[in-house]
Amino acid sequence: MDKPLSSIEDRVSSEYPQLSRSHRKLTHFILDNRLFAAFASAAALGEKAGVSAATVVRFCRTLGYEGYPEFQVEVRDSLPTYLHRVQRLERGLDTPDKGQVVTRVFELDEQNLSQTVKSLDMERFNAAVGAICRASDIRVIGGGLSAAPALYFAHSLKVMGLDARAVLNGGIPLTLELIGLKPTSVLVGVSVWRYVRETITAMERAQSLGATRIAITDSIVAPSAQRADYAFQVSTDGVAHSLSLTGMMALINAFVAAVSFERPEETARAVREVDAAYRQGNLLFTE
């Protein structure tokens, strides 16, 4: 007998491709509104999500729970990490005194790091690293809040001698980058919280061309994760309305380090060339 999956995320990830449209709709509502789902009746949850109470119960059983009560217990257990940011503000939850804000921020970032590495599948990670090392070219797509991590990732890979570029704007710039994709390309989609439509469109375009897709996101049912060959979930809990990108940046740093150790000679040569170019171009400030 298979070992039972230990979390809602694991269960949903395993079953999501086979879920019906109504069950997928319910999945997204629950993951975005766990505080409500933790204490609402099946009928109330179904009404809010736009499905019937019977659908809610069937959904729980599809995920391997004996029923709705067992499902709710696990939702409640997940609340400290996954409360929705807006719900936190509206309900005054997890709001520290002014003198404790800085301490709370660092505590949550420690938790984000712990949760991110805990959810990291090393076999998938190593496969993604190999794909990056073999790629003819790499495009890192990210908009809005995800733009800064995408830029950092692409820059780090480029400094190491890889053909990597960040695409932070949609429209014509994104279209021109997507035209150049081919089966030997890798596209990395960075997308958290409010998922930018153009990032998802880029993932779909890469998929149609046979390019390898890597997603870095905050949910296993995020649109980018569903369109990726390799999807990675990062924890993004923040103290106020905004997200924390600490877990995401740590994961990106892990990718950069792993790629560097996979191609040490090429990386060393590329870094030396970059340093020489900086000196020759008098780009660095010196006294």
Image (spheres, grey):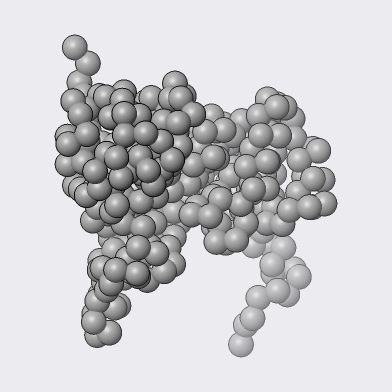
The residue at the far top in this view is: 1
Q: Quadrant of residue 113?
A: bottom left
* Quadrant (top left, top right, bottom left, bottom right) of the C terminus: bottom right
Residue at 70% across, 27% down: 208
When the figure is inspected, residue 214 is found, relative to residue 151, above or below; the finding is: above
Residue nearest the observer in this picture, 88 or 238: 88
Is residue 207 positioned above or below 250 on the image? above
- In the shown orientation, is residue 253 left or right of residue 103? right
Q: Position of residue 245 (x, y in %)?
A: 44, 60
Check the image and report above or below for 87 versus 76.
below
Is residue 267 toward the left or the right of residue 76 in the image?
right
Residue at x-position 17% and y-position 41%: 73
Locate residue 18, reporting x and y percent.
44, 21
224 sits left or right of 173 in the view:
left
Does 4 sit above or below residue 180? above
| Residue 268 visible at all | no
- The residue closer to the viewer here, 249 or 100, is 100
State the residue at coordinates (17%, 34%). 70
Quadrant location, the N terminus: top left
- Residue nearer the viewer, 46 or 227: 46
Q: Where residue 65 sits in the image (x, y, percent)?
A: 22, 27
